[in-house]
Image (spheres, helix red, strand yellow):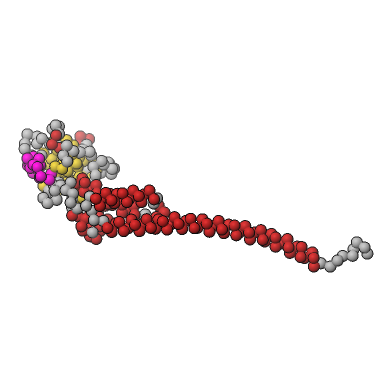
Amino acid sequence: MGEHSRKKITWTIKNFSSLQCEKLCSDPFVVARCNWRLCAYPKGNNVDYLFLFLEVADHDSLPCGWRRNVRFSLSILNQNTIKRSRKNDEQKWFVKESPRWGSVSMFPLNEIHAKESGYLVNGELKIVAEIEVIAAIGKSDIAEETSTIIETMDVNGFQLLPSQMELVSRLLERHPEIAYFGAKNSNLRTGYMSLLLSLIETLRQSPHELSKTDLAEADAALASMTNAGFKLDWLEKKLDEMAEKKEKEEAGETRLQEIEEELKDLKQKCSDLEVQLEKEKIEMSAAKAPISFDDVL
């Protein structure tokens, strides 16, 4: 038995309606030290359904006896959050002789292409795959690597990276109105969320790390989001607070430099006075000494 591993990825197919190819495949991605890819027949492969399947990307080079028991789901994402995505769940053994499994009848093409269906936005179709390797027989020496397919999760129409989930969850808990931002376009919603997270991360830096140019750019970004309908009074207060701290920091640095210069001058005066004091002590000691008669007696 081998590694137990799981992964969730989102494959975005651009210009889906105008594709002329019979078969389209995603970039390879790694699960349980094995290369996989998603494949689709955008024209249906002689049926009126989107033919979608998961396959081992390098199955021709697999060693004899190689097998993987995989639980997986393939779904097309409904980018209109009012409606649900269509999903197909399977659990199959992938072997050298049968390296691909999928569904022919789950995704009607007429439904995908229908106006206002929510499956196509700006010509893009988003396919989400959740893959879990339950059992592995036979070695595979492929190391985990970065794929051009980005793992994302849909939250209120925002496509989020796993690393963003914790921050966004806290953000929506404290400011639930953000989830009801009026843009219907998933790309715009995701873009604005990325901008919002970037603003927050920027303002979480220390004032010393930020320049006035950084703050001016943050103010412009905040204004664009406010114009787009976001209610971000709380973030505006944080930006004002940061600007005030930046001014105090710069004023403090100027005053510190002035004090250091004054202290430097005082130290030099002290040093000069110490030298003058030693000279005066020597002269005073000479003045107190009695007169010598050694030269006349």
Residue 111 falls within the magenta-colored stretch:
yes
Q: Residue at x 9, y 36 (%)?
A: 44
Is 27 in front, or is 226?
Answer: 226
Specify whether 90 is left or right of 201: left
The span picked out in magenta is 104-119
Mainly helix, strand or loop, the magenta region? loop
Seen in the image, is 175 located left or right of residue 114? Answer: right
Q: Measured along the vertical axis of the image, is residue 23 above or below residue 200? A: above
**Percent x, y of residue 249:** 43, 57
* Residue 105 drawn above or below residue 182: above
Frontmost residue, 296 versus 61 = 296
For the point 20% across and 38% down, the residue is 26
From the viewer's perspective, tell me whether residue 260 is left or right of residue 195.
right
Residue 122 drawn at (x, y percent): 17, 41
Placement of the C terminus among the 4 image quadrants: bottom right
Front residue of this view, candidates 231 and 144? 231
User: What residue appears at the point 21 percent right and 58 percent down from the top-left corner?
Assistant: 176
Indicate the position of residue 160 as horizontal and vertical percent values: 23, 50
Q: How many marks?
A: 0
Q: Residue furthest right?
A: 297
Q: Quadrant of residue 292?
A: bottom right
Q: Residue at x 29, y 56 (%)?
A: 235
Which quarter of the figure has residue 49?
Answer: top left
Residue 98 on the magenta segment: no
Q: Position of residue 107 (x, y in %)?
A: 9, 43
